[in-house]
């Protein structure tokens, strides 16, 4: 209950609106999950009206009992059954008529916006996307706890998958193993489609698993995440499968692994509240571009990291070229990489909570 009230207060801070209307389509608005705290249910097409003193959820008979079981104490759940549209219209209009109403314009389709503008007879609709994003960017204790569990689950899934690798296994089979182990270890599912790269495919940062078979003395890159209570994790590990330690190829792969590991460590020193996200990115990039006589210059081709939360690429500042300052209790990924087309690539990624003293790996 206290968590829900705190989240509502954070969203309304600086928002010059009387109420906020969130409407799910066939997908859930992540802010719906943020403000309800629900961890189960589909809630397709549901309407959430948020006021400073509480929330009203309009839902179908399919979701009513699920909503009632999860609702915070200051939420009223209204069941809108067959033929109940007129009642729903009256209820929404009674709550919003003549008021300044906030909407999440980054999610709400225009057709929905036009419909609600006419339906509610609100005085004005205001985009509160920024208010929602600012509230969600800094995580509460319960949110960090959920992300921490999601990290533990995906680490177990990764370790289990690495232990099961064998020559001839396909990337698709490894991906299936990851997804099975997420569920087996208590996860609600994958936070995104697992990226599994064998051999040369590791040079492709967003390669999706195919029928490529695993061979000895080749890279294995696993980039995957789990969901727990709607919160995501995002972890990447790169190893060499059955290395031939006397080969020139292995020595090159080992050097790449050590270089990325060092870059990640250097970046960690700058992940701190009050410091721009660009500082850690610049530290990792400079190291990769200049080490070993500059042989890896230009091979680190993406930002250092992104926010992690209800969405795997969550709202708020990340670790890239932007100078936005990190705030305490933000969660970001730290994932430098080296990619050499035709040879392979290395990426190492951990999820990090920002504190005033520095970053802590979850």
Image: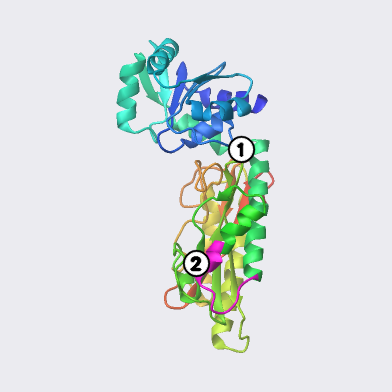
**Tag 1 or tag 2, which sits nearer the N-term?**
1
The percent coordinates of residue 354 (x first, y second) are: 63, 45
Examine the image and state in which quarter residue 255 appears.
bottom right
**Position above or below: 335 against 14:** below
Q: Residues within 10 Å of mark 1 (few under 14, many from 20)?
A: many
Q: Viewer-nearest of labels 2 and 1?
A: 2
Quadrant hosting residue 70: top right
- Label 2: how many residues lie within 10 Å, few (<14), some (14-19) or many (20+)? some
Asked whether residue 349 is in view, the answer is no
User: Position of 179 compared to 300: left or right?
Assistant: right
For the question of whether residue 144 can be seen, the reply is: yes
Counting the numbered discs, the total is 2
Q: How far apart are the two marked residues, 2 and 1, measured between alpha carbons?
A: 34 Å
Identity of the residue drawn at 49% across and 41% down: 315
Mark linked to residue 139: 1
Q: Secondary structure at mark 1?
A: loop
Counting from the top left corner in percent of width and height, residue 250 is at 58, 82
Residue in view at x 47 percent, y 26 percent: 60
Q: Are marks 2 and 1 in contact (CB under 8 Å)?
A: no
Residue 328, relative to residue 254: is it above or below? Answer: above
Tell me what residue is drawn at x 45 percent, y 63 percent: 208
Coloured how?
A: rainbow
- Circle 2 SS class: helix
What range of the chain is rendered magenta? 164-176
Most distant residue in the bottom direction: 246
The residue to which callout 2 is attached is 172
Residue 165 forms part of the magenta stretch: yes
């Amino acid at each position: 209950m206290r968590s829900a009230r705190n989240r509502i207060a954070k969203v309304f801070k600086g928002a010059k609106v009387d109420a906020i209307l969130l409407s799910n389509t066939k997908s859930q608005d992540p802010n719906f999950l943020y403000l309800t705290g629900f961890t189960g249910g589909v809630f397709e097409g549901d309407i959430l009206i948020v006021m400073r003193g509480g929330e009203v959820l309009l839902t179908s008979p399919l979701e009513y009992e699920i909503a009632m079981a999860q609702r915070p104490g200051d939420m009223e759940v209204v069941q809108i059954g067959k033929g109940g549209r007129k009642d729903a219209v009256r209820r929404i209009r009674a709550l919003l008529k003549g008021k300044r109403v906030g909407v999440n314009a980054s999610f709400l389709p225009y057709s929905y916006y036009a419909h609600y503008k006419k339906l509610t007879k609100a005085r004005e609709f205001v985009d509160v996307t920024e208010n929602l994003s600012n509230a969600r960017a800094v995580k509460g204790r319960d949110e960090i706890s959920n992300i921490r569990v999601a990290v533990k689950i995906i680490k177990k899934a990764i370790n289990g998958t690495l232990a099961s690798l064998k020559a001839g296994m396909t990337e698709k089979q490894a991906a299936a193993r990851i997804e099975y182990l997420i569920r087996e270890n208590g996860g609600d599912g994958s936070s995104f489609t697992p990226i599994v790269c064998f051999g040369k495919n590791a040079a492709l940062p967003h390669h999706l698993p195919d029928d490529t078979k695993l061979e000895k003395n080749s890279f294995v890159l696993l980039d995957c995440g789990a969901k727990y209570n709607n919160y995501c994790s995002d972890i990447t590990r790169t190893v060499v499968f059955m290395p031939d330690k006397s080969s020139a190829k292995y020595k090159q792969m080992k050097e790449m692994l050590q270089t990325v590991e060092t870059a990640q460590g250097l970046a960690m020193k700058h992940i701190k509240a009050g410091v721009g996200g660009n500082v850690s990115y610049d530290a990792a990039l400079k190291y990769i571009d200049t080490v070993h006589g500059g042989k890896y210059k230009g091979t680190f081709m993406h930002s250092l990291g992104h926010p992690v939360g209800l969405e795997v690429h969550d709202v708020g500042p990340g670790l890239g070229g932007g100078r936005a300052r990190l705030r305490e209790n933000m969660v970001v990924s730290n994932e430098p990489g080296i990619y050499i087309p035709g040879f392979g690539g290395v990426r190492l990624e951990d999820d990090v909570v920002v504190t005033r003293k520095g970053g802590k790996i979850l």
